[in-house]
Amino acid sequence: MAAKNIGTYHLNRLTNLPDHLTIDRIIRHVHCDEYFVSYVPPDIRRCPHCGSADCVIKDSGYTQTVRHTASHGRGTLVTFHKRRLRCKACGHSFFENPDWIHPTLHMTLALYYQLAMDLMQKSAIKAIAETNCVTPATVSSVLSSISFGLPSHLPETLCIDEFKGSSGEWQPGRSRWNVNRYHCNIVNGDGEKGYILDILPQISAEFVKKYFRQFPLHERERVKFFCCDMHNGFLSVAKEIFPQAHICIDMFHVVKLVNDTVSEVRKRLQQEVKNDKELWKLLHGSMRTLLLNEADPKNTLAVNNPRRKEKLVFLFSRFPDLEEAYEALQAFHLVCGEPYPILKRAALTDWIERYTASSVPEVEHLAHRIQHWRGYIHNTWQYGKSNSPAEGLNNNIKVLKRVSYGLHDFETFRKRVLLCFGAVQLEREPFTIFREKREGKVLKL
Ligand SMILES: [Zn+2]
């Protein structure tokens, strides 16, 4: 029974129902509570088919029960009466839909908003269903009611990166999933903290180009900086789609390339001495020592360690190739440590000149690759850009993927990613968006 002593106002607030409803009674079932509510129907009855206000009551209608937000850890249902009306103008019959009920899903708007807000958190659909005392299918129905279109604008700084995924499309003809191993992450890198503009199921240059061609030319011309890693596919995208943009490559990847070269040389030498266990062990054990950045003040203590020095002297006397690779790495760190872009450029030119003539094949190959990317490295220094917004958001995507135990369907995955890390959270108040969504609009970020 509804408590008669407390006012309707308080009761409605406690049950998360609109103020103008009257709770007639509450029935306690085993797994949920059911609220029976009544309300005064609005005076204006508008036809959903033609918009005419000239509607009459056709019959008494029927009683509907919908899901509502959980209260004290218990699921709730709301039962109310719906009238059936007939439009005099077009002759259609329709049920009067109160504005606090979702027009197509069997739930109150309060629950719809609650579930939509929960979908913006990094948690699994099953977990969201449990906290709201509904079935996972109900949560999924909210997710499928939301759809994201193409972003409306492109940013000034566009970051693009790849990430590993396992989502794809269900192919009914072949009864299997068509899964792409790598997906592409497009990030708005303007400002302090980037956000995800969109994710694409494939990373092939053709696919990415096709995607960007959907934007009109004046939008594409807004992009001033295109940040990516050392991936020739992205390079061709930038050159073809954003001819005005300055291409910047992330320094992290360049340094990683130099580090990898040192490791490559070490591994080759290890192979050569694999019969000499002692020497093999020494080389294998020097993995981290060889990658130490001597220019970093944090490493001063390690650099001056006499045992390390001794070890290196021995290794270098035995393997001159390793010394060359090590020196190339340290010289590269010094290049990056130069204070001004102009000094960095000059130092890099010297570096390339020196090591393209190297006798160690790995180092020579590396120098040629750096030469290939030199112009973009210069841009990175000059404009101070990096791909870190994309890299950071990739980590967040990974977390979402883990907590969801994998998201098979790419479109569902995309919606979750855009809800959790897209512009919804940063630019606009989410409620407005969901309200627009209710009117059947596609979300544009
Ligand atoms: Zn009508």
Image: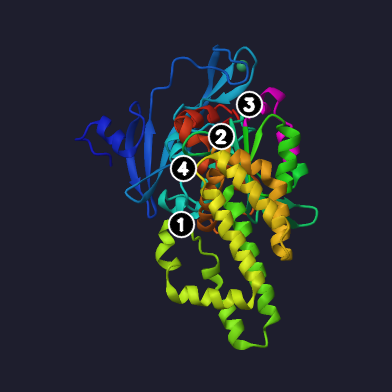
Q: Position of residue 97 (x, y in %)?
A: 50, 27
Give the residue drawn at x 71%, y 25%: 216
* Labels 1, 4: front one: 1
Decide which of tag 2 and tag 3 comes sooner along the chain.
2
Outermost residue, right direction? 173
According to the picture, the residue beneath numbered tag 2 turns out to be 104
Q: CA distance from mark 1 to mark 2?
A: 61 Å
* Labels 2, 3: front one: 3
* Labels 4, 3: front one: 3
Q: CA distance from mark 4 to mark 3?
A: 36 Å
For disc 2, the neighbor class at 10 Å (few under 14, some 14 to 19, many from 20) is few
Camera sees residue 76: yes
According to the picture, the residue beneath numbered tag 1 turns out to be 296
Where does the magenta region start and end? 208-224
- Element type at mark 4: helix
Q: Position of residue 131 (x, y in %)?
A: 41, 51
Who is closer to the viewer here, 269 or 212?
Answer: 269
Q: Position of residue 28 (x, y in %)?
A: 34, 49
Image region (quadrant) for ligand 1: top right
* Residue 166 within the segment the image draws in magenta: no
